[in-house]
Image: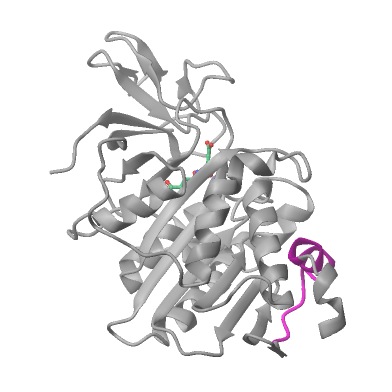
Amino acid sequence: MLTTQDFNTFNFIDFVCQNPDQHERFELDIEQGKAIFHDAGILEFIPKQTSDQYVCLSCGVHGNETAPMEIVSDIVRDILVGVQSLQVNLLILLGNPKAMLQQERFLEFNLNRMFNHHWKSYLEADPNCYEALRAKRLESAVQDFFEKSPGDARRYHYDLHTAIRASKHQRFAIYPYLDGRDAKAEQLAFMQDCGVNTVLLYHKPSSTFSYHSSHHFKADAFTVELGKVKPFGENNRDDFKQSENQLRKLVAANYHFNNDRSTDELNLFAVKKELLRVSDDSHLNVDDDLANFTEFEQGFELLSDPEEPYVVESDGEAIVFPNNKVPMGQRMALLIEPVSLG
Ligand SMILES: O=C(O)CCC(=O)N[C@@H](CCC(=O)O)C(=O)O
Ligand SMILES: [Zn+2]
């Protein structure tokens, strides 16, 4: 059991690694309010002063994306110790503890393809599917958290990732489909303040965690790619400092959202097409080390497939997240094009 004496050395990653099957809820009174350990990797902080801001920071939805877990773990320790001010309702989620233990992206299935209730079909096929059970549990944690917020409260969910490959834009975010709502200038400004100068507007509902929070709870939600995947301990934390500092400001209710920041420096893209695996023979003709946002020339056969190949239609079409190792029906890459704010 955790006591206040342990706070100085508390490491959320180690704690979750040691207790991946811990499902018992326990509460601790801390100097700045309350810490509620709901389940493995599900930790809620309630500040002493009531707040109308509900912030969810998730990381480790892919178990090998270590830098965001290190950042979040440090923030947790600093809240417990009292050196990080806690002025918002905060939900911290470490998404896939068992994949993290193995430093793998996932055990069996990609957790970030299971939200928005997509876990149901996986559970029908296998009632013990770890990732499906985890998606269900994470959804209920987010639901309990956001449903406590009054109607006019601010709800935020930043799902922190790192990308498999290098990227022409080192940090970038996916703004999930907004179901007809407008992109928010203040959110794009927040991304820029985090050092995220590239945003990709998603074009349709999806099964990602950020879309789930955006769709069901009208949260301002993003998937944020903060850098490149590296093993624990090998991240250069200076590369992440700017993002970490803004997240810390947010937790301290010390970040002031504003609509007036210029978006001149923002690279905005929209998804033109999802390239899906449609057969066992679907194959992207890209090198393993090809950087995200690499552009292609018209006429290049980007996706080979006997039935549905994709040939680049115009110069400058680019891709992100190319992956030849996805199951049938899942996306092998996103084809994107630059856009400007309407
Ligand atoms: O680098 C890669 O290929 C994957 C990085 C990653 O995990 N990205 C997320 C993006 C989620 C979204 O589209 O909002 C994912 O693929 O789940
Ligand atoms: Zn990821």
Where is residue 144? Give x, y as percent: 48, 83
| Chain part drawn in magenta | 12-25
> Quarter of the image holding residue 46?
bottom right
Residue extending farthest to the left is 342
**Residue 196 painted magenta:** no
Name the residue rendered at 76%, 77% in the picture: 22
Where is residue 215? Give x, y as percent: 32, 66
Name the residue rendered at 25%, 36% in the picture: 264
**Residue 86 horizontal side relative to residue 317, left or right:** right
Name the residue rendered at 34%, 71% in the picture: 216
As displayed, is residue 215 above or below residue 342? below
User: Can residue 164 be seen in this snapshot?
Assistant: yes
Where is residue 145? Give x, y as percent: 48, 81
As displayed, is residue 276 above or below residue 187? above
User: What colour scheme was applied to this rendering of the protein?
Assistant: one colour
The C terminus - image quarter: top left
**Residue 61 horizontal side relative to residue 169, left or right:** right
Residues 161 and 282: in front is 161
